[in-house]
Amino acid sequence: MPSFIQKESTIIQKIKPDIIVSDISFMPILAAFKNKIRSVLVSNFVWNESLEIPNNLKQYVKNSYEKADLILQLSLGTKMDFEQANSIGIVARQPTHSRKQIRKDLQFFNWKKNNSTKIF
């Protein structure tokens, strides 16, 4: 096992989480698998389909992703060819500022709105 995955695994053993959630990185997925902890990959693309790397490395990354219990494919991304992949909508957190405050901070008040422009 590569040393960087061993480091992840050591941290996991100390923390003892119930689940590991990773945003595109395959290393936590492998460490979770090694420690028999459920894992979820959340992303709009995967490295094995996006990088120009040798085929053996692409396959290694793909095999790593396949160890995830669940893959949540965000919208507006590339197709993911995994059995455990599920397409979901846009994910966002609750805003901490009002629309009015955001418009003020970004100086949107001086923009002219026309039929083809939607300003939140």
Image: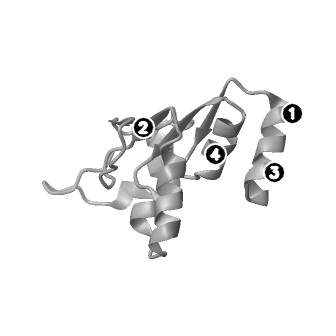
Q: Which residue is mark 4?
A: 30
Kindly report which numbered mark, 2 or 1, lies closer to the viewer in this rendering: 1
| Residue 40, percent from left and from top | 53, 35
Alpha carbons under labels 4 and 2: distance apart: 17 Å
Amino acid under disc 3: Lys
Query: Badge 4 local density, few (<14 within 10 Å), some, or many (20+)?
Result: many
Residue at coordinates 45% horizontally, 62% vertically from top-left? 48
Residue 72: mark: 2
The image quarter containing residue 97 is: top right
Q: Is residue 89 above or below residue 6?
A: above
Kindly report which numbered mark, 4 or 2, lies closer to the viewer in this rendering: 4
Q: Nearer the viewer, residue 55 or 108?
A: 55
Q: Earlier in the sequence, mark 3 or mark 4?
A: 3
Residue at coordinates 78% horizontally, 37% vertically from top-left? 12
Amino acid under disc 2: Leu
Alpha carbons under labels 3 and 4: distance apart: 11 Å
Q: Are marks 3 and 4 in contact (CB under 8 Å)?
A: no
Kindly report which numbered mark, 4 or 1, lies closer to the viewer in this rendering: 4
Q: Earlier in the sequence, mark 1 or mark 3?
A: 3
The image quarter containing residue 19 is: top right
| Residue 61, percent from left and from top | 52, 58
Residue at coordinates 44% horizontally, 71% vertically from top-left? 55
Q: Secondary structure at mark 2?
A: strand
Q: Which residue is mark 1?
A: 14
Residue 103 visible from this viewpoint = yes
Alpha carbons under labels 4 and 1: distance apart: 16 Å
